[in-house]
């Protein structure tokens, strides 16, 4: 599927909602565990969610080696079970691997293959991609990792189609993410796949995290990029979100930021990692997802509210970004289906 923006969209949505039984999420631990990336999995999938009136994920910590390991920073982590328990997992999270030149234990690779063959989804964070690659789960598939590890991933596994400037790649049952915080993006993406954008937004709000980040890894490599967005750019983005039904052009956004079009375009790309118009199209689709989930409005009305002049243009844009049609998305995630 064609990449759009700074993620690689999913191949397919799940065939049916999983709100009734989202299944077991298992996170792998090992000596030298990357503590922050382990914590991401715990925060997104392992915490109780009393704010929701439906079953949340089950969660388990699975030992790749010893049950009791020392994570980065001297933290001791004790696993709930061993590799044999991966057979019950619907989703497996692999945090960053301790050494990209070290082949993971064969027992771990075999267990991952068995689980994948049994229908489990595998998601790697940062250098965890080297574990999935060693298991053969990424052969002839797309994947990503932290920009510093990309040359090594290409060299060690030439059969992998490495995408360099994305935050995560969704290949259906195998997902890979870039640097550590991109793991948050990928995990929220899984929540969005399972429960829809409203629930993913609620989880992101509790994390005090944006539900979806624009841009890709290019904005984080060593280049003279501003450390934080300027106020003018933020004001322009807020203005655009409030006027999505309008036919917004570059001049409208630059005027709201009190900049010339040329200066605004340059600063926006530096700050966000996308052109203003590509960012705007993603915002239109995010709004459309919310309306499809929460309302019974006809597709034509939703298209109009999100700034599309024709239903066909809306359908094409939605399919390109989300990976499915607006009607199929509504069928999957409308609140009346829960």
Image (cartoon, grey):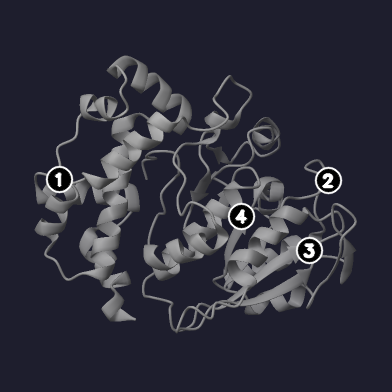
The x, y position of residue 226, in whole percent, is: 54, 25
Dot 4 crowding, Cα within 10 Å, few <14, some 14–19, many 20+: some
The x, y position of residue 48, in whole percent, is: 60, 78
Find numbered disc 2 in the image and state the secondary structure of the residue it sits on. Answer: loop
Q: Nearer the viewer, residue 109 or 316?
A: 316
Rendered view: 96 above or below 240 = below
Q: CA distance from mark 1 to mark 2?
A: 51 Å
In which quarter of the view is residue 47 placed?
bottom right
- For the residues carrying marks 1 and 2, which lies nearer the camera in this image? 1
Mark closer to the chain start, 2 or 3: 3
Q: Residue at x 59, y 21 (%)?
A: 223
Question: Disc 3 designates what residue?
Answer: 29
Question: In which quadrant is the N terminus drawn?
Answer: top left
Mark closer to the chain start, 1 or 4: 4
Residues at marks 3 and 4 touching, judged by CB atoms closer than 8 Å: no
Left-right relation of 192 to 179:
left
Left-right relation of 237 to 140:
left
- In the rendered structure, find residue 308 and report the number of the disc placed on it: 1
Dot 1 crowding, Cα within 10 Å, few <14, some 14–19, many 20+: many
Question: Disc 4 designates what residue?
Answer: 137
Find numbered disc 4 in the image and state the secondary structure of the residue it sits on. Answer: loop
- In the rendered structure, find residue 159 and report the number of the disc placed on it: none
Q: CA distance from mark 1 to mark 3?
A: 47 Å
Mark closer to the chain start, 1 or 3: 3
């Amino acid at each position: 599927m064609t990449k759009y923006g700074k993620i690689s969209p999913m191949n397919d949505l799940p065939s049916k909602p999983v709100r009734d039984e989202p299944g077991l999420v298992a996170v792998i631990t090992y000596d030298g565990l990357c503590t922050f990336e382990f914590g991401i999995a715990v925060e997104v999938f392992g915490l109780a969610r009393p704010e929701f009136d439906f079953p949340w994920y089950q969660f388990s910590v699975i030992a790749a080696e010893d049950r009791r390991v020392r994570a980065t920073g001297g933290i001791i982590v004790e696993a709930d079970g061993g590799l044999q328990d991966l057979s019950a997992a619907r989703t497996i999270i692999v945090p960053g691997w301790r050494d990209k030149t070290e082949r993971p234990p064969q027992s771990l690779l075999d267990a991952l293959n068995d689980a994948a063959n049994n229908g489990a989804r595998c998601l790697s964070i940062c250098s965890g991609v080297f574990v999935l690659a060693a298991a053969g789960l990424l052969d002839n598939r797309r994947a990503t990792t932290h920009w510093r590890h990309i040359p090594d991933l290409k060299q060690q596994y030439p059969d992998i189609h490495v995408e360099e400037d994305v935050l995560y790649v969704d290949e259906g049952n195998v997902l890979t993410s870039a640097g550590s915080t991109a793991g948050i993006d990928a995990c929220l993406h899984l929540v969005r796949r399972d429960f829809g954008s409203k629930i993913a937004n609620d989880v992101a709000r509790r994390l005090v995290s944006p539900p979806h980040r624009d841009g890709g890894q290019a904005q984080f490599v060593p280049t003279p990029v501003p450390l934080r967005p300027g106020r003018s750019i933020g004001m322009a983005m807020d203005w655009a979100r409030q006027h999505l039904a309008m036919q917004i052009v570059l001049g409208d956004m630059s005027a709201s930021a009190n900049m010339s079009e040329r200066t605004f375009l340059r600063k926006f790309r530096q700050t966000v990692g996308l052109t203003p118009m590509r960012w705007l199209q993603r915002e239109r689709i995010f709004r459309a997802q919310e309306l499809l989930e929460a309302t019974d409005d006809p597709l034509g009305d939703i298209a109009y509210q999100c700034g599309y002049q024709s239903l066909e243009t809306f359908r094409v844009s939605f399919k390109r970004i989300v990976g499915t049609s607006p009607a199929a998305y509504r069928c999957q995630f409308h609140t009346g289906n829960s």
